[in-house]
Image: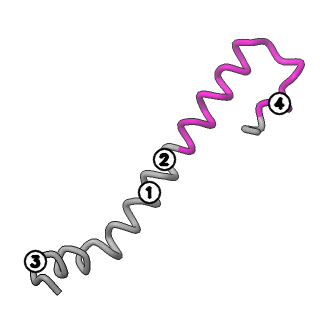
Amino acid sequence: MTGTELLAGASPSVQALAVIGVVLLEAIALYVGYGAVEEAVGPAVLDRLANGR
């Protein structure tokens, strides 16, 4: 599921480090993605909220 099943013969420490790496990369991708969405949509939403339209 995370790609770490490809490391079936690896030690538990290596598998754990792989999971940590995958989670870190996912967190970075979400941070950048949500930042881009907020940058694109945020001003329009705030304008609508402020003007009540």
SS state under label 2: helix
User: From mark 1 to mark 2, how far is it between C-alphas?
Assistant: 6 Å
Q: Mark 2 = which residue? A: 28
Q: Position of residue 26 (x, y in %)?
A: 56, 45
Q: Mark 4 = which residue? A: 5
Count the marks: how many? 4
Q: Earlier in the sequence, mark 4 or mark 3?
A: 4
Q: Earlier in the sequence, mark 1 or mark 4?
A: 4
Q: Is residue 42 magenta?
A: no
Q: Residues within 10 Å of mark 4 (few under 14, many from 20)?
A: few
Q: Position of residue 25 (x, y in %)?
A: 56, 43
Task: Tell me the mark number nearer the camera, choosing from 3 and 2.
Answer: 3
SS state under label 3: helix
Give the label on residue 32, or none: 1
Q: Residues within 10 Å of mark 3 (few under 14, many from 20)?
A: few
SS state under label 1: helix
- Relative vertical location of residue 23 with respect to residue 31 in this rendering, above or below: above
Q: Position of residue 30 (x, y in %)?
A: 48, 52
Q: Is residue 7 magenta?
A: yes
| Quadrant containing the C terminus in the rendered view | bottom left
- Relative vertical location of residue 36 with respect to residue 51 in this rendering, above or below: above
User: From mark 3 to mark 1, how far is it between C-alphas?
Assistant: 26 Å
Left or right for 37, reference 18? left
- The answer to whether the residues at label 1 and label 2 have Cβ atoms under 8 Å apart is yes
Task: Tell me the mark number nearer the camera, choosing from 4 and 3.
Answer: 3
User: Magenta stretch?
Assistant: 4-26
The amino acid type, in three-letter code, at marker 4 is Glu
The amino acid type, in three-letter code, at marker 1 is Val
